[in-house]
Image (cartoon, rainbow, N blue to C red):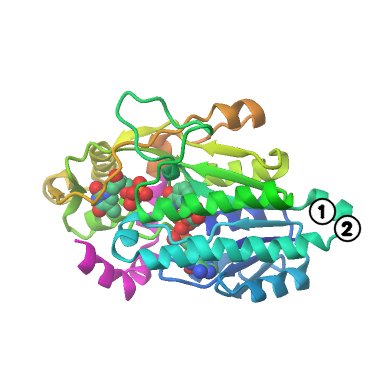
Amino acid sequence: MIFVTGGAGFIGSNFIHQWLKFEKEDILNIDKLSYSGNLENLKNIEKNPLYKFVQQDIVDQNKIFDLLLEYKPRAFIHFAAESHVDRSIHSPLEFVKTNLLGTFSVLEATRLYWSNLTEKEKEVFRFFHISTDEVYGSLDDNDPAFDEEKKYEPNSPYSATKAGSDHLVRAYFHTYGLPVLTTNCSNNYGSFQFPEKLIPHMICNALEGKNLPIYGDGKNIRDWLYVEDHCEAIRLVLSKGKVGEVYNVGGNNELKNIDVVETICSILDELKPKAVGSYKDQIVFVKDRLGHDRRYAVSTKKIESMLGFMPKESFKTGFRKTIEWYLNNPEWVANVQSGDYKKWIKINY
Ligand code: NAD
Ligand code: TYD
């Protein structure tokens, strides 16, 4: 069996679907179900005998240790985090709790469990930390893409707490020999993403006839990776990655925010045309995010040359699939837009 934390969120739920499809090995999902955790993402596999769910905050180390003793997994994949930069600007404490204390808690519980395994079990065990390219800081237009040697220069409470969690993982390898793997991935998009993040936010607002709010001048750049490609990279690193190593993961798809939003509008104009005009008419420029990082770009040379990873989806094909998914799942969208979502939109926009 393997454990995942945060499996009811965007990337974690996509990972569980892919795991059950290709690996056919038991998987236990530990998730506290914060505002972004949604069991609807897992509805069509909840009865799969290989899948189990436990509602649990990762900060409770004793509970995590008990689960480890009960199920004896061979790997622990740690997705759970507070993940939205804008929220980290409004409420940084939650980020310190989950991203720093939570990661410490799962590392410490895992270390205690791992140190009592047999030598053979110890050797094959893996603790896999899912992290972000944002820990490396911000690039200017002509700077080279982040490679794994890039100095950490996190700028938001989100990226600072993720950077701290990466350092804890590194320290558990160097100090205790815990067999860890870390990936630092660029911006993901795809099905089941909570519509506070740029791409689903723009799709949902466009369809509802609302403004499409672009921060600042819209020229900030992100590298976009289709979530299923990210999940493939994680499975590859889990099976073939070298213990103690860090792998950057990216889509080789650098785009300005304005180009992302205009592309979404063009695809929507084709798939669900408005009675009059284009969805582009809904674009508005709004006050910039505090401390807004200008550009992220990821060098994927290491994971390509060492493990043979190549993303399957291009920006164009992945975007179309994603927009089609949101168009085909209006109930999911309506359900996640109740409750906390409404409060958040009031606070941020
Ligand atoms: P998400 O916000 O959609 O999901 C996070 C999940 O973690 C939710 O299910 C939530 O309930 C759970 N969670 C939060 N706090 C918890 C706690 N204290 N205990 C237990 N569960 C808790 O986030 P996501 O986009 O799926 O991101 C998953 C991971 O991938 C994060 O570690 C994030 O830093 C990393 N990452 C995300 C992206 C991206 O573009 N979304 C890119 C690179 C890396
Ligand atoms: P986001 O999806 O929040 O990811 P991150 O900040 O982790 O990269 O935002 C992606 C980019 O889109 C980022 O430069 C901020 C910008 N953005 C907007 O312009 N408007 C919005 O409403 C949102 C949510 C983001």
Label 1, on which residue? 122
Nearest the eye: 214 or 24: 214
Binning the other alpha carbons within 10 Å of mark 1 as few (below 14), some (14 to 19) or many (20 upward) gives some
Q: In the shown orientation, is residue 63 left or right of residue 338? A: right
Image quadrant in which you'd find residue 254: top left
Residue 69 falls in image quadrant: bottom right
Residue 221 image position (x, y, % from top left) = 31, 36
Residue 140: in magenta span: no
Query: Going 58% across and 29% down the picture, which residue do you hit?
Result: 302
Is disc 2 placed on a helix, strand or loop?
loop
Q: Residue at x 52, y 30 (%)?
A: 300
Q: What segment is highlighted magenta in the picture?
A: 321-349
The correct choice, above or below, for 245 with respect to 129 in the image is: above
* 172 lies left or right of 143: right
Q: Where is residue 249 shown, x and y percent of the image?
A: 52, 38
Q: Is residue 27 visible?
A: no
Q: Amino acid at mark 2?
A: Thr
Q: Is residue 107 visible?
A: yes
Residue bearing mark 2: 118
Q: Kindly identify the amino acid type of the residue bearing the numbered disc 1.
A: Lys
Q: Quadrant of the N terminus?
A: bottom right
Measured in 3D between alpha carbons, the distance from the residue under mark 2 to the one under mark 1, in whole angstroms, is 6 Å
